[in-house]
Every structure is written in C-alpha cells, then in structure tokens.
C-alpha cells in the first residue's frame, strides 16, 4: 500500500446484513455501581402518592400519579445542579405527553387513531431523548405512560385534575432526586472522577485501544460532570487535579485505584500532588464554565441540538423506525382482536437502539424478559388481590426489583417490569387473569416482530456519513490542540485545556460513531484504516500535551484519501 496522498484510503468491506448473536445479548453483567439510587428513588417517589391515594380510597388514580413518580428514574448520573433542571424537564415532558394522550383518548375511541397517535408520540419522544442524550431509561418510560393513557377511559373534563396529580407526584420525584444534595453535595462528581481514575489505572496496567478509549470517555465524562456541577469549591478543585492525573495516566495503577477508592468513599477527597508540568492551582473549571455561559457558547449548543433534530440528522432514521414499528405493532394487535394494544406499541418502542445489531439484542432481551415476567405476574396475582395494601406493596417491590436487576441485563429487569405494568391495571378494577396473560404474550411477540422488522427495513445510511464528519471534526480538533500547545504562552493554560478537552470530546464522538456504524445494516463500507490512524494520532497528541514534556508529536495526516505512516518514535 502506498503512503502517497493521492491514494485512496483503504476500506474494509462489511456484509450488508450482519450475523445476529443469540447467546451474548442474554449474558449477565456486573451490576452498576449506582444501581440502588434509581431503585430506592422510584420506591420513595411512588410510596408517597400510592399510600396517600390508598388512605383516600382512590387507588383508581394511581396511573396518573405513577406518571410523575417514574420521573425519579432520571438524572442519577448528573451533578445536582444539572439534575434539578433535567428532572424538572422530564416531569414537564411527561406531563405534556400524558396531556396529548388523555385529550386524544377523550375525543375519540377509534383504535386506528389511537395507535397512530401513540406511534407518533413514541417517535417524537425517542428523537427528543436521543437528541438531548437523556440517558437510561430514555424514552421508554415516557412512551409507556402516554401509550397506556391513550387506551384508558377518559373524559375531557377530567384531564386537568389528572394532569395535576402527575405534576404533584413529579414534584415529589424531583425532591427525591435532588434531596441528597443536602447530605453529599459533590457525590455525583466524586463518582465520575473515581470512574475516570479506575479507567486510567486499567489503561496503565493493560495498554490497548479498548482501555485507551474507555479511559478517554471516562475522563471526558468526569470533566463534563465537573463543569456542570456549579461554582468551583475546594472539593471540586481537588477533583479537578485528580482528573488531570487520570488524563496523564503516569501514576502507578495501584495508586490511581487507591485514589479512586478514597474519592468514592465518604471521607475527604485525596489531595494529589500537581501533575507533571501543571501548576498547583488549576483554572479549567472556571474557564470552561465561563465559555459555556458566553452567548457564543449557548448559540453553539442550540445549533448542535437543532442539527441533531433536523432533516439531515443521523437520529432521524431511528425515529422513523420507531414510528413505523410502533404503528405496525399496534395495528397488527388490533387486527387480531386485542382491545388495548398499548403494550405492543411499548414493546416495539423499547427495542430501538443506536443500530440494527443493538436493536436485535434488545429484541431478544425484551421478548424473553416479558414472557418470563408474565409467568411471575400469574404467580403473584393471587397475593396482590388479598387487599389494596398488598397490591400497593407488590407494585413497590417490583419497581425496586426492576431497577435493581436491569443493570445486570435488560431481560432480567423486564422480568420485574412486566408484572409491575400488569398490576397497575388492577388499580382500576380486576381483570380475568387468563385474558391479561394472553393479551400480554400476544402483544409482546407481535410488538417484537414488528419492531425489529421496521429496524431491518428502514435503512440508516447516515451512520457512515456521521463517521466521516466525526473524522473531519477530530482532525480539526487535533490541529487546534497542537496549535494551542505550540503557542501556549499566548493561549495560556485555560486555552490549552479547552483545546485538549475539545479533542477528547471529538475522539469519544468518533469512536461512538464508528461503533454505531459498525453494527448498522445496508450501508457502505467504513474507512477502518483511516479511523485507526485518526484515533492513534489524536491520542498521541493528547498524551504529548497532557504530559507537558515538549512539543507534541506531529500526528499523521488523515485527510480523506490519505493515510500517512505513524512517526517511528510515536507510540500509539
């Protein structure tokens, strides 16, 4: 292969439709280090309105309060300042979706219209959650609530009172999510920095592309968490110094892990020495927050959000898949006589991930979890019908179990989600067990089939285009970082840090785009060699500028159509 700029960069051909795994998607993982936070939060946020309605004898209103209570599942990885805004936004979004569903249900009883509105709401919620990167559980909870409300008996005059119940329960959920700030103000930042230190230790202990990317993503996440946390405090200054050590990754891995353990614990934050070449005091947090507060930074953020929702967005095909798959699932179930096919809509909506391969994984997980969950529901139904309090306690138990298990694997969490969703129907009155079980099995199977069929047939060729744009952005960010370091006397430490953070973000985005495109069907081959060269070059620049050991090694050119060899003295 020639290294001259005129040669086309080699591309690795990939099959149009990849082989789909069967066993790997069902393997259990280690639980999340914060699994108990959403699990306890949703129980606390649900218990208050549930028990209040129980005391008032109005458990038939649980569906409306549960819509607000489920908002407590969001934002647990965010610092409290941003979490407060995020959870408030989720409560308002939940209320808006519920309002649209309730008004529609009160105006028409046409199953065709209700399914169409449900599919449209699901697609809108999917696109919006992906655009703002809301994170787990994403759009699924919003779609579950709005789809169920579409098929609930409703009169137009009842809508304001029902929405008020949702807002009241949402306020309780907001307090539950934000309340721990009074006890441990920097808890989310400490956990994010601890993850960065652990990832950096893994990178030092086992160098390689996987650990390198994981460390870069963890460092980027820790920095973003610090920037969003609020004004700099002594604790956040110490956390910033720890992030710098994670960036340089020069320390002994055991030392990094020891720092991570102390940072995650409740004691004082470790006070590390200044990283090589850095001053004792750092100014990155304040400088980056000032840049974000500037009008230009806000305009750039708004433009990025609008592009992610615009006609050329790579998210649009996934939203179209959601629309078509949910509509198809709903209409199929209605044609087979299911009176309220909302669960088919929810099943289809829950499948859609970033690419077709991940969507297949979720299809297996959701189908297995729902079918097992139906059996669990059948087993606990007699217990739940012993009294209203037993029904409330069963729902709270399965709410906790779902969040406790879902980080091990999605199918395991679905085993608990399914009986919880079916028990909610019991608050409005008892239903024949055989009818509930039979309809839920049919909804699950048809929803999964229709959902994956839409994912397979609706192409997402924009995934490869996103990779190309990410390559260009990474190359530009690398050039900017090298210029900032070469002229560091003028740019200063704050300017150099901003350039380095931008490069880290572009590299994380590049790897994410490449991973998504690699699992997508029906698209052109990816420039694998160019991706590898761009990542190696970017991480080489990061290493050189982070260590402050002299001028950064000039990275190989990665323009379209050229892949130059890496310098002999440049370690990847």
Image (tube, rainbow, N blue to C red):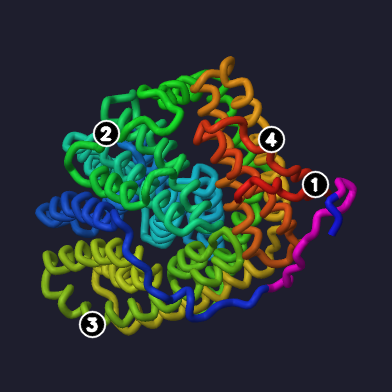
Q: Left of 18 or right of it: where is 527?
A: right
Q: Nearer the viewer, mark 4 or mark 3?
A: 4
Q: Is residue 197 above or below residue 550?
A: below
Give the percent coordinates (x, y) of residue 498.
53, 28
Q: Nearer the viewer, mark 2 or mark 1?
A: 2
Dot placed on the residue nearer the N-terminal end, 4 or 3: 3
Numbered mark located on residue 560 in the image = 1
- Which residue corresponds to the image point at 35% horizontal and 80% vertical from the top-left? 372
Give the percent coordinates (x, y) of residue 42.
25, 53
Name the one closer to the observer, 58 or 490. Answer: 490
The local secondary structure at tag 2 comes to loop
Q: Residues within 10 Å of mark 1 (few under 14, many from 20)?
A: some
Name the one closer to the observer, 191 or 314. Answer: 191
**Residue 11 visible:** yes
Q: Nearer the viewer, mark 2 or mark 3?
A: 2
Asked if residue 136 lies in the magenta stretch, the reply is: no
Which secondary structure is most common in the magenta stretch?
A: loop
Dot placed on the residue nearer the N-terminal end, 2 or 1: 2
- Which residue corresponds to the image point at 75% horizontal and 50% vertical from the top-left? 565
The residue to which callout 4 is attached is: 476
Q: Are marks 4 and 1 in contact (CB under 8 Å)?
A: no
Dot placed on the residue nearer the N-terminal end, 2 or 4: 2
Distance between the Cα atoms at labels 2 and 4? 35 Å
**Residue 76 visible:** no
Dot placed on the residue nearer the N-terminal end, 4 or 1: 4
The residue to which callout 2 is attached is: 271
Q: Left of 550 or right of it: where is 560?
A: right
Considering every residue shown, the one lying at the far right of the view is 6
Residue range (magenta): 4-17
The residue to which callout 3 is attached is: 379
């Amino acid at each position: 292969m020639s290294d001259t700029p005129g040669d086309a960069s080699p591309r690795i051909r990939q099959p149009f439709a990849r082989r789909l795994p069967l066993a790997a998607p069902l393997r259990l993982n280690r639980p999340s280090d914060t699994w108990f936070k959403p699990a306890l939060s949703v129980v606390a946020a649900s218990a208050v309105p549930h028990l209040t309605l129980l005391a008032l004898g109005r458990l038939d209103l649980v569906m409306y309060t549960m819509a607000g209570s489920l908002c407590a599942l969001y934002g647990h990885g965010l610092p409290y300042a941003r979490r407060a805004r995020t959870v408030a936004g989720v409560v308002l979004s939940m209320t808006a979706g519920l309002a649209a569903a309730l008004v529609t249900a009160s105006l028409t009883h046409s199953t065709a219209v209700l399914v169409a509105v449900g599919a449209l709401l699901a697609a809108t919620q999917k696109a919006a959650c992906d655009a703002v990167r809301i994170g787990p559980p994403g759009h699924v909870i919003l779609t579950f609530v709005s789809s169920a409300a579409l098929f609930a008996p409703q009169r137009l005059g009842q809508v304001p009172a029902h929405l008020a119940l949702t807002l009241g329960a949402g306020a309780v959920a907001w307090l539950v999510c934000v309340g721990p700030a009074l006890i441990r103000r920097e808890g989310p930042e400490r956990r994010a920095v601890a993850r960065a230190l652990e990832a950096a230790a893994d990178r030092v202990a086992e160098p390689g592309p996987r650990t390198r990317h994981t460390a870069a993503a963890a460092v980027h996440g820790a920095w973003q968490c610090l920037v969003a946390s609020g004004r700099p405090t002594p604790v956040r200054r110490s956390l910033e110094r720890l992030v710098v050590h994670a960036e340089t990754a020069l320390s002994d891995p055991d030392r990094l892990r020891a720092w991570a353990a102390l940072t995650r614990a409740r004691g004082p934050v470790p006070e590390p020495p200044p990283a090589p070449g850095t001053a004792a005091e750092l100014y990155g947090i304040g400088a980056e927050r000032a840049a974000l507060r500037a009008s230009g930074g806000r305009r750039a953020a708004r433009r990025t959000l609008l592009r992610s929702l615009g006609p050329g967005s790579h998210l649009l095909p996934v939203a179209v898949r959601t629309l078509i798959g949910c509509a198809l699932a709903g209409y199929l179930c209605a044609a087979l006589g299911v009176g309220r096919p909302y669960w088919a809509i929810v099943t289809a909506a829950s499948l859609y991930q970033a690419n077709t391969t991940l969507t297949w994984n979720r299809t297996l997980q959701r189908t297995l979890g729902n079918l097992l969950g139906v059996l669990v529901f059948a087993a606990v139904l007699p217990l739940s019908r012993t009294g209203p309090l037993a029904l409330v306690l069963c729902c709270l138990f399965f709410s906790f179990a779902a969040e406790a298990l879902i980080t091990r694997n999605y199918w395991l969490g679905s085993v608990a989600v399914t009986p919880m969703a079916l028990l909610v129907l019991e608050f409005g009155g008892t239903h024949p067990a055989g009818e509930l079980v039979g309809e839920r099995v049919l909804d699950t199977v048809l929803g999964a089939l229709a959902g994956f069929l839409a994912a397979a047939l609706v192409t997402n060729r924009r995934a490869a285009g996103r990779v190309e744009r990410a390559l260009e952005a990474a190359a530009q960010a690398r050039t900017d970082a090298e210029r900032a370091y070469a002229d560091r006397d003028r740019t200063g430490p704050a300017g150099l840090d901003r350039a380095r953070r931008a490069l880290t973000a572009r590299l994380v985005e590049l790897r994410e785009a490449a991973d998504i495109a690699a699992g997508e069907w029906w698209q052109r081959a990816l420039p694998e060699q160019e991706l590898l060269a761009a990542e190696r070059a970017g991480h080489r620049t990061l290493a050189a500028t982070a260590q402050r050991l002299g001028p950064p090694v000039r990275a190989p050119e990665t323009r379209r159509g050229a892949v130059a060899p890496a310098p002999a003295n440049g370690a990847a």
